[in-house]
Amino acid sequence: IPNKTYLFFSHTIKKQPYNRKLLQAILQKNIRLIDYEALKDIQGNRLVAFGRFAGIVGAYNGLWAFGKRFNLFELRRAFDCFDINDLKLELRKVKLPPVKIVLTGAGRVGKGAMETLDTAGIRKVNAIDFLTKTYAEPVYTQLSSADYHERKEGGHFNRDEFHREPERYRSTFNRFLKVTDILMAGAFWNPKAPVLFTKQEMLAPDFNIKIIADITCDINGSIPSTIRPSSIADPLYDYDPHSNSDSPAFRHKDFVTVMAVDNLPCELPRSASEEFGRDLIDRILKPLLFEDPEGIIKRGTIAENGKLTKEFSYLQDYVNLQV
């Protein structure tokens, strides 16, 4: 509807090609677009997000997929659980052999995934022990960007520099490919940053990963096996690195099983909606409807009066393309 204010996740901030027409239509129709993803406090922290529930469900689905692939245990699907407490009770059924799980990311998604792994009784270990030690029980390690990136020019990892100029870094994640059974990807990925690993590395004979739960679900992004999203109804597919193609899950023992559902919080709608709604009421309604001394709404506005706002002017070339 023209000349209205809309709040939603537009998925245009990274110049996602599949939503270019959406942003073009918003500008043509003089719509003020406020993007949930851009609503942040002065320190740059997100104020409303589904990340925690994406992490909780994504990690749950990763464990569920491993149980199914190797006929180890049966879990109800997350959407069959009444709420988060019911899902956590279901996690008591997880019985894993001494596998190793890598979780990337330390934000909301990473913390949510950690909640699931901790509830399942899986022990957390540091990255060095993960790489060098053998365990008689399942373990996981949580990696921050510093654990799998190094400066191309040498010297110490600098977090601010990495976020500002990620192209100055290379991935060292290949150290983990030989010892990891399950990868749970929950780290934000900048398209200018190095990929986590390559298709060529997946072809190596010592590539060990069996299940990839790509919670962030960047299509053709940091993880080469995420060539398409999957759905809640059909959450898994097998990826063949030789042909760079997908097939139905559990088709071949040498394929990698991928979980790339891009709307994971929808599997726990009751709990996710309650938390998101509470954050909207407590943090967004007042600055949206009354006064906004911290500029929260201004910073979160992508388009207004038929134009991109100053902060999002970098999207202009993306909008101009008529593809």
Image (cartoon, helix red, strand yellow):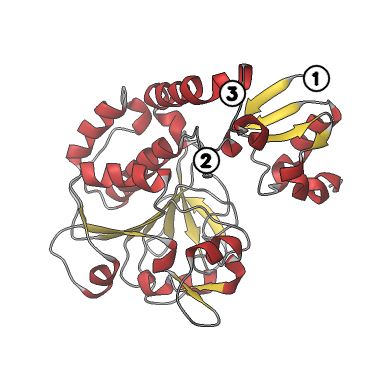
| 99 shown above or below 37 | below
Amino acid at pointer 1: Asn
Name the front one of labels 1 and 3.
3
- What amino acid is found at the position of numbered circle 2 in the picture? Asp
Viewer-nearest of discs 1 and 2: 1
Q: Secondary structure at mark 2?
A: loop
Q: Which residue is mark 1?
A: 3
Q: Which residue is mark 3?
A: 287
Residue at the front extreme, as displayed: 293
**Residue 133 image-quadrant placement:** bottom left
Q: Quadrant where the N terminus lies? A: top right
Identify the mark at residue 262; answer none if there is no mark.
2
Counting residues from the start of the chain, the first of labels 1 and 2 encountered is 1
Which sits in the foreground, 28 or 259? Answer: 28
Which amino acid, mark 3? Pro
Q: Secondary structure beneath disc 1? A: loop
Which is nearer the eye, 86 or 248? Answer: 86
Q: Which badge, 3 or 2, comes first in the chain's sequence?
A: 2
